[in-house]
Amino acid sequence: MSKPAAGSRLSDRQRLSWLRLIRTQNVGPASFRDLINRFGSAEAALEILPELLISGGAKRIVRVPSIAEAEAELEAAGRAGARFVGIGEVDYPALLKNMDHPPPLLAVKGEGAVFRLPAIAIVGARNASLAGIKMARMLAADLGRDGYGIVSGLARGIDTAAHRGSLSTGTIGVLAGGLDLPYPPENIGLCNEIAEHGGAIVSEMPFGWQPRAQDFPRRNRLVAGMALGLVVVEAAQRSGSLISARLAGEMGRLVFAVPGSPLDPRCAGTNGLLKDGATLVTEGSDVSGAIAPLAGARVPRTAPLEEPPDFSATPPPGEDERAGVLDVLGPTPVAVDEIIRHTGLHPAQVSMVLLELDLAGRLERHAGGNVSLVFGGS
């Protein structure tokens, strides 16, 4: 079973194997990509997983979801009017696949055509003021009429207003939990309206997954990754919206902020962003004027998964090589290139050791391709 070329479709068998692999504990987007690149297919990676876990020092062998369990999730998606879209398929958001470690599979409910609109994210406070809600809705409506899709996180307050403002022109809601468990529950109706009016609801989490606090930054990463720029309407000094703004900046997206009263704590974060160089926004044209040059640019066409590297001339890592990599790893993130230079090992060997550690739950990946041992790792 080969992996799909960009723009092609996964076969049913591939989609099932991809779902089983990404739902396996400790297999995240980065390790998924490494496994496919190394072994050529998800099916082959599933077969070799137990051996890799042992090599990585896992305390126990994680359970791989069965074929029946993966089929049950696919059936649940079908009952919900949703489908799973793989990276490289035509309905996968173009900008998303070019960020670091994009999700290999997205659950999607609604129209894939909305992903082909140049997108702008609008986020902000859950306990938004009436003025903030009015502003978010107005910005979304104006930008929607200008031909932009609006991305947000379906939270109360600013997110909901942004979705409502762009309902007729194209909006994308990103969930922190399963596609069948929208949060907050009062936005279940809004989710259905979005899907029925040409927009889309997406999630990388399993069906039946109740969102936890740690899942929301992961959702914020997708919100930022789908858009050319991100607008913060209201945000407190310590808020998820500022996390979204930071992630957007790290991805090279444009960051915008609506100014607010210095006396309102809901505006402390947005005013801080403006001090740090965010673009000031008082109307939709402030955003569209800055985004327009980017919206006309072609998104780089990158292969969703690289060609497997040539390991034929490189022996697999042994215990000495594993020990050498572990010796240079610690709680402080380091660049993979530095590990290669310091150990003198072949890049393929270092890559394999890092993959084994990742699958064993002993490696943490950071922005910019840096890695570290998890706390308590050896």
Image (spheres, helix red, strand yellow):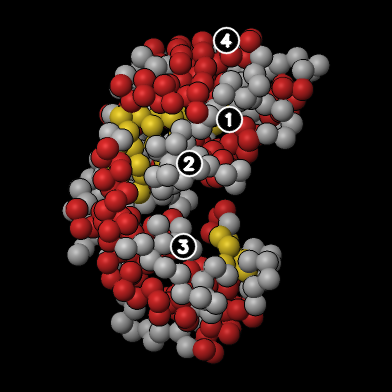
How far separated are the C-alphas under marks 3 and 2?
17 Å
Residue 371: give its label. Answer: none
Contact? badges 3 and 2 (CB < 8 Å): no
Identify the mark at residue 255; answer none if there is no mark: 1
Location of residue 299 with respect to 167 vertically, above or below: below
Q: Residues within 10 Å of mark 2 (few under 14, many from 20)?
A: many
Identified by mark 2, the residue type is: Gly
Identify the residue at image location x=35%, y=42%.
107
Q: CA distance from mark 4 to mark 2?
A: 27 Å
* Residue 264 picture quarter: top right
Of labels 3 and 2, earlier in sequence is 3
State which quarter of the image contains the N terminus.
bottom left
Mark 4 or 1, closer to the camera = 4
Q: Secondary structure at mark 2?
A: loop
- Amino acid beneath label 1: Val
* Camera-nearest residue between 119 and 23: 23
Q: Residues within 10 Å of mark 1 (few under 14, many from 20)?
A: many
Vertical position of residue 357 compared to residue 314: above or below? above
Which marked residue is nearer to the observer: mark 1 or mark 2? 2
Tell me the number on the disc at residue 134.
Answer: 4
Q: Nearer the viewer, residue 353 or 210?
A: 210
Measuring 60% from the left and 35% from the top, which residue is drawn there?
Answer: 245
| Residue 193, image x, y percentages | 36, 20
**Secondary element at image label 4:** helix
Which mark is first along the chain, 1 or 3?
A: 3
User: Residue 264, can we see it?
Assistant: yes
Q: Which residue shows up at 38% across the image and 32% down it?
A: 201
| CA distance separating discs 3 and 4 | 42 Å
Q: Are marks 4 and 2 in contact (CB under 8 Å)?
A: no
